[in-house]
Structures are given as structure tokens and as C-alpha cells.
Amino acid sequence: MINPGLSPHFGGNPQIPEGDGDASVQAYIAAMSGWKQDVGRRVDRLIVAAVPGVRKAVKWNSPFYGAPGQEGWFIRFHCFNKYVKVTFFRGLSLSPVPPGESKSQDTRYLDIREDAELDEAQLMAWIKQASQLPGEKM
């Protein structure tokens, strides 16, 4: 049976209404399927710990995070069938540069797969760095 918050046509990504704030992001995470929900909780927890007062929203069926007092967004994540893709909008400016390349010059990705070990210390370092850079306006 298909979870009512998911569509088989969108690679298992939750399809929920757009909205601002933590409640919208938590609704998205609650609609994530299986092991991906744990990844969503972990990523959200790391972002909140790294960036006190972080702004949150769900746009285009993905959680977005912005640094307090800044315009734009520095990170988001999105579910696919076999991984959760974390997007760093200014990822090319991070050190070390996240591994996933993008068609966008500045954007870099981190794909988190079910059986992969998540280096939380490295992810936290990237989150902190990314939050200090200008946000992507959308």
C-alpha cells in the first residue's frame, strides 16, 4: 500500500503542501518512508544544532533551511528511491567540497544511502560553513 503522503511518480519523495516553519518541515519528515525518515530527522537535528535560530520552510516538496537574519537558503534535502540528496547551494565554497557535482556551478550534493555510514561531524562542519555564506534566493 502506498503512503498517502507519497507518490510513486516522484521517486518516493513526500508530496505535501508548501509552508513556512518547523511544523511544515516536521510534516515532510513524518511523510518520509522507511529508513529515509531517520535520515531526515538526523539531518534536521544537525542543522538545528549547527545553526541556532535557523529558518525552515517546505518548498517544491523539499525542506529548505536559511540562516537567521539572512535572505535565501543555504541547504535543502530531497528524497529519491535509493538515497536522500542533501543540497548545498554554495557547496563549491565549502572545505572540503562535498562530493556530488551539479550542473549549477556553485551547488554540490551529498547523497545519503540506506547502508552508508553518515559522517555527522563532516556534515555538521559543512552545515556551519554553508550557513555563513550568502543564501540562494528562490
Image: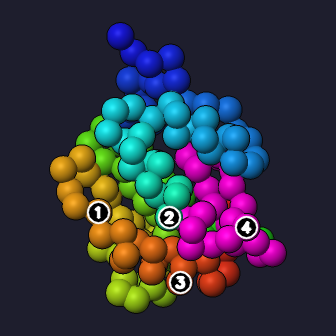
Mark 3: give few (<14), some (14-19) or many (20+) Cα within 10 Å. Answer: some
Measure the C-alpha gap from mark 2 to mark 1. 12 Å
Task: Please tell me which residue is depicted at 50% across the width and 17% down the height of the picture.
Answer: 4
Label disc, if present, on residue 87 of the rendered structure: none
* Residue at 40 percent of width and 26 percent of height: 9
Frontmost of labels 3 and 2 is 2
Residue 73 appears in the rendering: yes
Residue type at the position of mark 2: Leu
- Coloring scheme of the render? rainbow
The residue beneath circle 1 is 118
Which amino acid lies under the numbered mark 4 shown in the image of this protein? Gly
Give x and y (percent) for residue 136.
65, 70
Q: Is residue 105 magenta?
A: no
> Which span of residues is magenta-colored?
47-70
30 relative to 26 in the view: left or right: left
The amino acid type, in three-letter code, at marker 1 is Leu
Q: Is residue 27 above or below residue 121?
A: above
Do the CB atoms of the residues marked 3 and 1 lie less than 8 Å apart? no
What amino acid is labelled 3 in the image? Gln
Left-right relation of 2 to 129: left
Q: Which residue is mark 4?
A: 53
> In the image, which disc is placed on residue 129?
3
**Separation of disc 3 and disc 2 at Cα?**
13 Å
Q: Report which residue position mark 2 lands on.
A: 46
Q: Position of residue 110 (x, y in %)?
A: 35, 65
